[in-house]
């Protein structure tokens, strides 16, 4: 999208820059007019339960370094992606920005969510202290082509797609999914998220939280049925209730994004899932073999 707008773009990858290191972070942002900060150590519930300390340490260090080094480098605008995981565990739905500080996040998400929540604190503090123009929009659960499909670390949509496709190809009669299937989530297609972040770079001149999403709630059980149908898997779904559900309900009030950014999500969930499944089947990542056990 930036290329289409005629921007000169530079993509910073973790293989080349360790943003936990201030000097490396400075090299990463040096010479940039606008920085869109998407870097994170992040995963699904299983990953979160195994890695609470790296989640909080790495994300705090990355966020702090990106802000300080962007300021020192003379960056004109910093857009730092915050996360829906920052919201309290028992937030009334749809989540309103006014509820953000009214409780502790869901326990498995808390180290990650609180570290990313500090982006809002950094944005406000740096705006007041230095006049540094930044924002930290709160982004809903993302999905789309190019996702992480590792079953140990991935988020729910990527994990389901891989399980259903591989079970179909292997002729397996059952797919086992985590939890009860009763919680709800909101899912934002990656292209919509990218467009929202570019609008934030152009139009969002406040450090106040702004929700970025579809505003539509989807029960995990219904999501599984949709992915089963779209992948052509004809077997049974078994829910493993010994595994955690995570936050009971999660979807966003997106009125502020409409008002401040003029942003509306455009890709319906089923269409986004169809694109993502097609991409997974065409461009299966290395090490993800057809017919592997689900």
Image: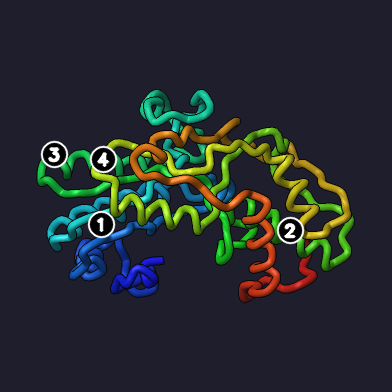
Q: Label 4 neighbourhood size at 10 Å, few (<14), some (14-19), many (20+)?
A: many
**Mark toward the viewer: 3 or 2:** 3
**Mark toward the viewer: 2 or 4:** 4
Name the N-terminal-most of marks 3 and 1. Answer: 1
How far is mark 2 from mark 1, CA to CA? 36 Å
User: Does residue 281 sit above or below 48 in this rendering?
Assistant: below
Mark sitting on residue 285: none
Q: Label 3 neighbourhood size at 10 Å, few (<14), some (14-19), many (20+)?
A: few
**Mark toward the viewer: 4 or 1:** 4
Task: Please name the residue shown 78% across and 49% down the image.
Answer: 176
Give the residue number, with chain letter if any, for mark 4: 207
Side (left or right) of 8 relative to 220: left
Task: Please name the residue shown 56% across and 50% down the image.
Answer: 44
Residues at marks 4 and 1 touching, judged by CB atoms closer than 8 Å: no
Mark sitting on residue 128: 3
Residues at marks 3 and 2 touching, judged by CB atoms closer than 8 Å: no
Name the N-terminal-most of marks 2 and 1. Answer: 1
Q: Is residue 251 visible?
A: yes
How far is mark 4 from mark 3, CA to CA? 10 Å
Name the N-terminal-most of marks 3 and 2. Answer: 3
Side (left or right) of 132 relative to 161: left
Q: Position of residue 121 (x, y in %)?
A: 26, 39
Name the N-terminal-most of marks 4 and 3. Answer: 3
**Mark toward the viewer: 3 or 1:** 3
The C terminus - image quarter: bottom right
Give the residue number, with chain letter if any, for mark 1: 66
Question: How many numbered markers are drawn?
Answer: 4
Name the N-terminal-most of marks 2 and 4. Answer: 2
Q: Position of residue 227 (x, y in %)?
A: 74, 52
Residues at marks 2 and 4 touching, judged by CB atoms closer than 8 Å: no
Name the N-terminal-most of marks 4 and 1. Answer: 1
Give the residue number, with chain letter if any, for mark 2: 163
């Amino acid at each position: 999208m930036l290329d289409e707008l005629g921007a000169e773009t530079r993509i910073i990858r973790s293989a080349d820059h360790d943003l936990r290191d201030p000097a490396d972070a400075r090299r990463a942002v040096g010479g940039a007019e606008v920085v869109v900060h998407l870097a994170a150590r992040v995963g699904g519930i299983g990953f979160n339960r195994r890695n609470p300390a790296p989640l909080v340490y790495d994300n705090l260090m990355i966020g702090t370094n990106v802000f300080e080094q962007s300021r020192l480098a003379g960056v004109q605008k910093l857009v730092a992606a915050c996360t829906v995981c920052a919201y309290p565990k028992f937030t009334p739905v749809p989540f309103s920005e006014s509820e953000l500080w009214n409780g502790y996040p869901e326990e498995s998400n808390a180290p990650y969510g609180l570290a990313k929540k500090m982006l809002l604190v950094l944005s406000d503090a740096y705006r007041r202290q230095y006049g540094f123009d930044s924002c930290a929009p709160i982004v809903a659960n993302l999905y789309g082509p190019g996702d992480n499909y590792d079953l140990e670390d991935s988020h729910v949509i990527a994990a389901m797609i891989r399980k259903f496709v591989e079970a179909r190809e292997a002729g397996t009669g059952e797919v086992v999914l985590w939890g009860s299937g009763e919680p709800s989530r909101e899912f934002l297609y990656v292209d919509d998220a990218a467009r929202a972040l570019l609008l934030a770079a152009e139009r969002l001149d406040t450090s106040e939280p702004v929700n970025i999403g579809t505003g539509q709630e989807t029960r995990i059980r219904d999501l599984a049925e949709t992915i089963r149908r779209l992948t052509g898997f004809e077997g049974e779904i078994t829910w493993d209730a010994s595994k955690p559900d995570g936050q009971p309900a999660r979807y966003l009030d997106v009125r502020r994004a409409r008002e401040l950014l003029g942003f509306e999500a455009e890709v319906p969930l089923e269409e986004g899932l169809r694109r993502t499944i097609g991409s997974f089947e065409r461009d299966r990542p290395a090490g993800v073999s057809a017919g592997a056990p689900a």
